[in-house]
Amino acid sequence: MTFDEYQKRAMTTAITNKDPLMDKTIWAMGIAGEAGEVLEKWKKIVAYKDGHVSEEDREGLKKELGDVVWYVAVMADRLGLSFDEVMQLNLDKLASRARRGTIASEGDDR
């Protein structure tokens, strides 16, 4: 499946709002919320399990990471962006940073 195919399928489960600003705001908050859930699961692994990732932890993280991707795909769609193009742009940006030796520093456009 391509990223654009994923994006198209994700949109079949998205509930849209009549207010375009509220629509995009909900997707942006969803990205942050789901990323927070990934971080919360990771915190518990580090704080209470000495970094040991059980199969149950892996499955939980997989679900939360999937939720992050879903929200990103839907927000990109609502902004008129191809998910394939978003992902390719990201890979190109990171490859450029790696070539220039700036992959671990401040990066670009900040």
Image (cartoon, rainbow, N blue to C red):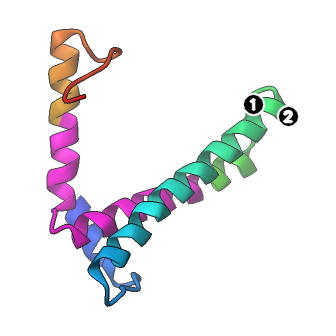
Residue 6 higher or lower than 41, as above or below: below
- The residue wearing badge 1 is 46
Q: Estimate how packed mark 1 is, as few (under 14), some (14 to 19) or many (20 or more) residues with alpha carbons within 10 Å.
A: few
Instruction: Count every numbered label the image shows and give the total.
Output: 2
Going by the numbered disc 1, the residue's amino acid type is Val
Identify the residue shown where x is 21% and y is 36%: 91
Q: Which residues are magenta?
A: 62-91
Q: Is residue 33 above or below residue 61?
A: below
Work out which quarter of the rendered image holds the N terminus and state it: bottom left
Q: Is residue 79 magenta?
A: yes
Q: CA distance from mark 2 to mark 1?
A: 6 Å
User: On the image, numbered disc 2 is attached to which residue?
Assistant: 48
Q: For the residue marked with disc 2, what is the amino acid?
A: Tyr
Picture quarter with the C terminus? top left
Task: Tell me the residue at 39%/81% (across/down).
Answer: 14
**Residue sticking out furthest to the bottom:** 18
Q: Judge left or right: residue 73 versus residue 59.
A: left
Q: Describe the element under mark 2 as helix, strand or loop.
A: helix
Image position of 92 with respect to 34: above or below? above
| Residue 92 within the magenta-colored segment of the rendering | no
Report if the CB atoms under discs 2 and 1 are less than 8 Å apart: yes
Residue 99 occupies quadrant: top left
Q: Position of residue 3 (x, y in %)?
A: 25, 60
The residue at 36%/85% (across/down) is 16
Is residue 24 at all visible to an observer of this figure?
A: yes
Residue 11 found in image quarter:
bottom left
In the depicted structure, whether residue 63 falls above or below residue 7: above
State the residue lying farthest toward the right.
48
Q: Is residue 2 visible?
A: no
Counting from the top left corner in percent of width and height, residue 105 is at 33, 14
Residue drawn where x is 20% and y is 51% of the image: 86
* Callout 1 secondary element: helix
